Amino acid sequence: MTKHVRYSQQRSLDSRILPIRSRNPLAALLILSPIAAAAPALADNDCMDGPVAQFGRYVGDWKIEDETFAKDGTGWSPGKGARWKFECIGDGTAIQDYWMPNGGGYGTNLRVYNADTAAWEIVWATQSAKGLMHIAAKQNEEGSIVMDILQPIQTPPRRIIFFTPDDGGWSWVQQMSFDGGENWTDVYRIRATPFVE
């Protein structure tokens, strides 16, 4: 049986494990994926200790209702919806999620907390894009998590905000800036509630 170590305990393994902060996020994704596949079902509290709880609080199976803001500014239109599953992997080492929109276009995120920078390093992979997207995230004073897309460069700049969960679920918004980051406009938003078969 493979012994998993918490991210905060693996400093001596950094050069062998290649965490996402390495120059090659694909290598980190490929190395951590077998850990996720081999890991037994873990208790929810494995990702509820320390800073990992920032994303650990989203662990679960979620029904997604989504809306897109019209490019001409005329208002919001409902999307097709999705299912989004968040799992704690590697005894709290990372959080992996599986985005499953109705109609296809599946994707996955691998989220690792970097204690040295007090920020999240995230890799997004999807069927519809070539290569990986690298994202940095940090929890703000209100408790929301702000995700900035680093690579590939986004024109216009985009960010995503995970809002603090409430009793019924949680909300998320994607924003774009049309003035170099001075102001942000909501362009896509979701509401997550517990998924029921």
Image: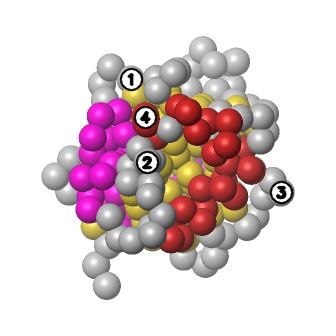
Quarter of the image with the C terminus in it: bottom left
Percent x, y for residue 16?
A: 67, 43
Give yes or no for contact between labels 2 and 4 (Cβ–Cβ under 8 Å): no
Q: Secondary structure at mark 3?
A: loop
- For this view, does 110 lie left or right of residue 169? right
- Determine the residue located farthest toward the left in the rendered image: 167
- Determine the residue located farthest toward the bottom in the rendered image: 197
In this view, the residue in front, 165 or 87, is 87
Q: What amino acid does circle 3 point to? A: Lys
Marks 3 and 2 sit apart, C-alpha to C-alpha, by 32 Å
- Determine the residue located farthest toward the top in the rendered image: 182
Marks 4 and 3 sit apart, C-alpha to C-alpha, by 32 Å
Q: Which residue is mark 3?
A: 130
* Residue 21 seen: yes
Residue at screen point 32% across, 20% down:
141
Q: Nearer the viewer, mark 3 or mark 2?
A: 2
